[in-house]
Image (cartoon, rainbow, N blue to C red):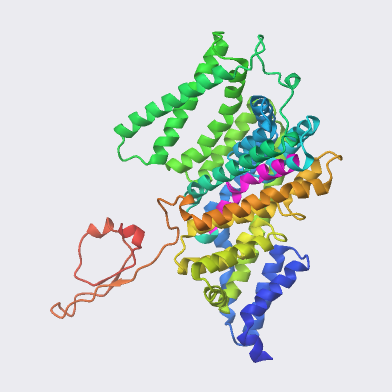
Amino acid sequence: MEQFLIANMAPIMFGALVVFLLSGFPVAFSLAANGLFFGLLGIEFGLLKPELLQALPNRIFGIMANDTLLAIPFFTFMGLILERSGMAEDLLDTIGQLFGPIRGGVAYAVIFVGALLAATTGVVAASVISMGLISLPVMLRYGYDKRIASGVIAASGTLAQIIPPSLVLIVMADQLGRSVGDMYKAAFGPGLMLTAMYAGYVLAVSIFKPAAVPALPPEARNLREPNGRSGVVSLLVLLLAAVGISFGFAEYYGSSHPNAASDEVGIYSAAVGIAVAFVLALANRKLKLGLLSRMAEKVVFVLIPPLALIFLVLGTIFVGIATPTEGGGMGAFGALVLAMMNRRLSWSLMKQAMDSTTRLSCFVVFILIGSSVFGLTFRAVNGDLWVEHLLTSLPGGTLGFLIVVNIMFFLLAFFLDFFELAFILVPLVGPVAEKLGIDLIWFGVLLGVNMQTSFMHPPFGFALFYLRSVAPKEVKTSDIYWGAVPFVLIQVIMVALIIAFPQLVSIEKKTDMKEQLELKIDIPSQQESPDSGTPQLNFSNENEQQQESSDAPQLNFSTDEEKK
């Protein structure tokens, strides 16, 4: 029996973890207890050395010193403040009025606002609850199908999982040893594509089942001119002017900065165009020029603050001005400013946001500590090799590996939260993917899109629970579940598209966060004097190596990055 346990310690340990999780025991403590139990068992059997567990304090202090994880409380706090700042209400009301005259207009508005909130808050609960409270009663009042209305709101809220600044991508980058900024850049395209696919589904429903997504009646459209016109023409003129100025600035900036990256040029030119549109609208209001309609003014003044916040957070990260942690800090400050401008900032709001942020941050850190304890023992009993042999022996090579891993994540998402999936499974499958030659940034975005379905799975999806908590009694739980099914299928199609067309995930420039140490020993030639001195340990980089030379041989521990 003892020999059987020693020979199969890794699969038994993994099976015991599954039993722990299915029993309902808290995930963080299940991981830590499992790791400690099998660590002590391995020491008892002579498979492991007692010194192994002495590495735990250093691993825990390493987690506490991880600057990347600071972005999680910053972005969580920013999202919770924005949820109560009135920004979501203004956006949904204004964009709903803009799209109201067309069939499915309110649904399009919900998807657009969901993407915008995702790019500012990064918190699913904030987006789903805000849109559920504001848009669902409006959609039901004007005859929207209950299933489609609830499905659109739940799906649009989950966009916060894949559109930066996503908490999932922060954790994914940390676990895979890649740059958060690179992960954000790579995920932006798939996030926008998924948003377009949601809108395409609403378009298909409006064509084949128009009664399910009616247009707003004329009496519900209150942003009209005195002569009864909608005022969309002046908005289009302003939009064309802003786009033209953006293109002009892009040409000027590109010619004057030939070495500038394309994303840098795009971000700066978009910021200039948005700023010009805001200045024109402000001048029109203050000077009473009458050049813009009520609709155009309202859209500008409602859209510019969140767009400015997006530039403050994502723009500075993409351009390289700020790290994700610094971007999160600026975003939290910007959210406080927006709440103050809307006169919604109060001590009770701050207290609620700080309490929720503290709970979520502690939740993440405890799971990370538990997974670190589990991972230490699991690797010590060669569990990583067991997983590697298990996955690399699958038929189909790389494609077979991707299909099996995505099916595994999809099924486990029925029962586990995305944090738990990221901390338990990603460290196991990530090294295997790297050995198979799969780019880890691409792999992280793929798993991020897959784990987004964990919020939409009936019956355990958290987005469905959030929507159920604010939905009217006339909306049945079964309506919410059936409404989510088409959007889950869309997300599965998106996963298949990323696998079939890897170029959908842009990975132009990557930063490897894992340092690789190179040992370089210069052996003295036989012609040199035997008393040329004792060997020296040299930790200098390339620039420092120009210092005073020595006849003694040197041991150079400089990294690849430093040598560049």
Residue range of the region highlighted in magenta in the rendering: 149-174
Nearer the observer, 525 or 430: 430
Q: 472 above or below 426?
A: above
Image x and y of residue 13, in percent: 66, 77
Q: In percent of the image, x 66 and y 28: which residue is there?
A: 102
Q: Nearer the viewer, residue 333 or 228?
A: 228
Asked if one can make out residue 191 in the rendered structure from this viewpoint, the answer is: yes
Up-down relation of residue 143 to residue 531 (above or below): above
Q: Does the stretch in magenta take in 166?
A: yes
Q: Quadrant of residue 55?
A: bottom right
Q: Nearer the viewer, residue 560 or 493?
A: 493
Relative height, residue 102 to residue 207 (above, below): above
Quadrant where the N terminus is found in the figure: bottom right
Query: Residue shown at 83%/41% (left/top)?
Result: 475
Residue extending furthest toward the front: 208
- The x and y percentages for residue 529 are 15, 78
In the displayed structure, does residue 154 sit left or right of residue 47? right
| Magenta stretch encompasses residue 274 | no
Dominant secondary structure of the residues highlighted in magenta in the image: helix
Position in image of residue 413 (x %, y %): 68, 59
Whether residue 463 is visible here, answered yes or no, is no
Quadrant position of the C terminus in the picture: bottom left
Residue at image location 60% in from the left, 39% down from the top: 115
564 left or right, relative to 404: left
Residue 89 is situated, as x and y percent measured from the top left of the image, at 70, 30
State the residue at coordinates (78%, 29%).
Answer: 142
